[in-house]
Each structure stands twice: as structure tokens, then as C-alpha cells.
Amino acid sequence: MTIGKKYGIVFSFSTLLFVSVFIFTAFLVYHMTNVVQQTEEKSDQAILITEIASLFRQKYILITDYMTNPRSETLQQYDQQTKRFKERAKVTMPSNTVET
């Protein structure tokens, strides 16, 4: 073998190694992008569920307020909280469920 062929083999091997590492790195970056996106979606869902729980607690407080001191303002606030609760609940419901 001549020195040129030896250099050609080494260069080809180096190029093949570089390209394979590049493809592997691109695959890992693509996979990590999907994982980050899924994590963000789950985080958004957790925030929404926490907000729904907070609205539920607020509704419960309004019920107890109304029991101790019946006022029309309390009923209006309860209706507003119920609307917010329903709006948020619709967002979290899967699309294939039927609302009754």
C-alpha cells in the first residue's frame, strides 16, 4: 500500500466516524426536544389542575359564607366561580368524553 492509500483510508474512517457522531447527536437532540415538550405539557396540565382545585376551594368557602350570612352577592360570586370552574374543567377533559 502506498502512503496515499493509507491516508485515504484514515481520512475515510475519520469522515465516517464524524458523520456517524453527527447523526447520533442530531437524534439525541431531537429526542430531547420531544421530552422537553412533553414535560412542558405535563407542567401546564398540573398548573391547570391546581387552578381547578383552587376554584373548588373558593366555591366551598362561598357556600359556607352563604350558609352563615345569606346574601345575593355571595350567590353571584358563586355563579362566577362555577363558570370559571366549568371553563377550566372543559380544557382538562379529553376530547373523546361526552359531556352530560
Image (cartoon, rainbow, N blue to C red):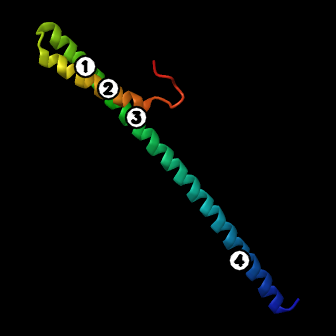
Among numbered discs 3 and 4, the one appearing first in the sequence: 4
Among numbered discs 1 and 2, the one appearing first in the sequence: 1
Quote the CA–CA distance across marks 2 and 3: 15 Å
Q: Which residue is drawn at 71% across and 77% down?
A: 14
Q: Mark 1 points at which residue?
A: 59
Mark 4 residue crowding within 10 angstroms, few (<14) / some (14–19) / many (20+): few
**Mark closer to the observer (1, 4):** 1
Amino acid type for the residue under numbered disc 3: Ala
- Circle 1 — which element? helix
Q: Residue at x 70, y 71 (%)?
A: 17
Mark 2 residue crowding within 10 angstroms, few (<14) / some (14–19) / many (20+): some
Foreground of the two, 66 or 10 = 66
Foreground of the two, 89 or 64 = 89
**Mark closer to the observer (3, 1):** 1
Q: Mark 3 points at which residue?
A: 46
Mark 3 residue crowding within 10 angstroms, few (<14) / some (14–19) / many (20+): few
